[in-house]
């Protein structure tokens, strides 16, 4: 259990400037403006919740350096560049990530040639095949299956019921949420004229450092080349990544998105929920795909695209703004047409 923080300690932790408040007050958690009490820190980063600032019972509120300090407040204020980052730092302090106990459960089944580094925690009913290497300080949750030739770097956190298929390579500090399947066969078949012939999928999945994979997400092994998720990328729940896909550094993909085979997602890209990208495409660095958008062509420059087929966001807004007017426009067209006859 973490110790409470004084206001000065909280300001130091988030690298902000403390304004007002009782210097003897301590903070023991983080809460929303609406639900916070005296010993909670809160924050304002979305102006949608600005009204809650007037009634909050929080003892401490994080505000942007650009925000005007409210008059006659009952709470202390820490001004900093990004209140949301400050909130994250406080939340991480009060809710630290789990650390390995170093214990291996008696029910674990492990291949004789598996190489397990010191201080690795392996929970109940985990199956570990031969030639697996697991780095120091990893945690493997209950019911995981780790197949032949898998490698994990240091400090990985694998939640329960994850499958790491043969040859999968994880870097350091990778987090994989429950139920994800990494390295399953890609969807590859050749039509012979009367049936589909399965194509052996012989590539691997390579996941670099500091990547997080959401629950029940599936990442297929490459058909020939590897499927690669580069360092710092974050994938939400229920995402499908097909064979041979490459996802660039620090790209973020929201839930239920799908990426077809051999597509390259650039660095710093974002994909909204339920968006999809067709196969063999290239999205340049900084591409933002709106929710439910369908991308069927390469992108040439960074920026937001929306709709189906996906077009620049402003163009899509203009087009979608016409939808409600279509019946009226159609009546005018019919009237002009009838008059021409």
Image (spheres, helix red, strand yellow):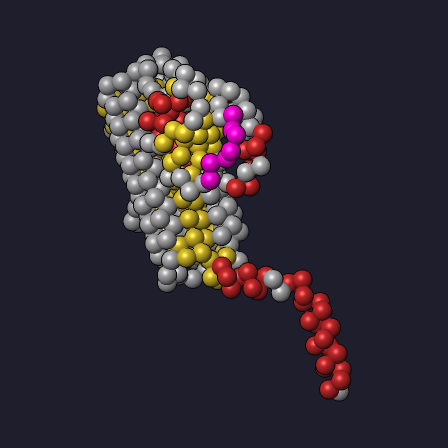
Quarter of image, res 13: top left
Prevailing SS of the magenta stretch? loop
User: Vertically, is 46 above or below 194?
Assistant: above
- Residue drawn 44% across the image and 32% down it: 62
Tell me where residue 148 appears, x and y as whole percent. Answer: 30, 31
User: Vertically, is 51 above or below 340?
Assistant: above
Q: As drawn, which residue projects farthest toward the top?
A: 106
Magenta stretch? 68-74
- Residue drawn 73% across the image and 73% down it: 331
Tell me where residue 163 appears, x and y as whole percent. Answer: 39, 31
Say if residue 146 shows up in the picture.
no
Quarter of image, res 15: top left
Say if residue 253 shows up in the picture.
yes
Quarter of image, res 10: top left
Tell me where residue 123 appears, x and y as whole percent. Answer: 38, 18
- Residue drawn 29% across the image and 20% down it: 120
In the image, residue 323 lies in the stretch drawn in magenta: no
Tell me where residue 75 appears, x and y as whole percent. Answer: 49, 26
Which image quarter is the C terminus in? Answer: bottom right
Viewer-proximal residue among 316 and 110: 316
Viewer-proximal residue among 233 and 121: 233
Q: As drawn, which residue projects farthest toward the front?
A: 72
Which image quarter is the N terminus in? Answer: top left
- Residue drawn 31% across the image and 45% down it: 249
Q: As drawn, which residue projects farthest toward the bottom?
A: 341
Total marks shown come to: 0
């Amino acid at each position: 259990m973490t110790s409470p923080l004084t206001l000065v300690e909280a300001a130091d932790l988030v690298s902000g400037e403390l304004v007002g408040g009782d210097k003897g007050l301590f903070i023991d958690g983080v809460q929303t403006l609406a639900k916070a009490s005296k010993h909670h820190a809160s924050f304002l980063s979305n102006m949608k919740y600005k009204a809650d600032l007037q009634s909050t019972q929080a003892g401490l509120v994080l505000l942007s350096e650009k925000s005007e300090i409210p008059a006659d407040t009952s709470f202390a204020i820490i001004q900093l560049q990004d209140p949301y980052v400050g909130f994250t730092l406080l939340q991480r302090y009060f809710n630290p990530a789990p650390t390995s106990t170093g214990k291996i459960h008696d029910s674990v089944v492990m291949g004789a040639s598996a190489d397990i580094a010191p201080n690795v925690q392996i929970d109940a009913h985990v199956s570990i095949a031969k030639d697996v290497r697991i780095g120091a300080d990893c945690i493997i949750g209950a019911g995981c299956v780790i197949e032949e030739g898998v490698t994990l770097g240091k400090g990985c956190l694998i939640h329960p019921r994850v499958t790491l298929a043969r040859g999968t390579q994880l870097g350091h500090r990778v987090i994989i949420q429950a139920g994800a399947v990494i390295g399953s066969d890609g969807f590859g078949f050749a039509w012979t004229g009367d049936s589909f012939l399965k194509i052996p999928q012989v590539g691997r999945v390579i996941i670099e450092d500091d990547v997080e994979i959401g629950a029940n997400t599936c990442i297929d092994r490459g058909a020939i080349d590897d499927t690669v998720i580069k360092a710092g990328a974050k994938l939400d729940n229920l995402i499908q990544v097909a064979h041979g896909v490459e996802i660039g550094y620090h790209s973020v993909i929201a839930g239920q998105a799908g990426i077809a085979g051999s597509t390259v997602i650039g660095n710093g890209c974002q994909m909204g929920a339920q968006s999809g990208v067709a196969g063999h495409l290239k999205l340049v660095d900084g591409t933002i795909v709106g929710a439910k958008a369908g991308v069927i062509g390469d992108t040439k420059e960074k920026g937001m695209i929306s709709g189906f087929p996906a077009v620049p966001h402003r163009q899509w807004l203009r087009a979608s703004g016409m939808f409600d007017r279509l019946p009226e426009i159609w009546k005018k067209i019919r009237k002009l047409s009838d008059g021409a006859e």
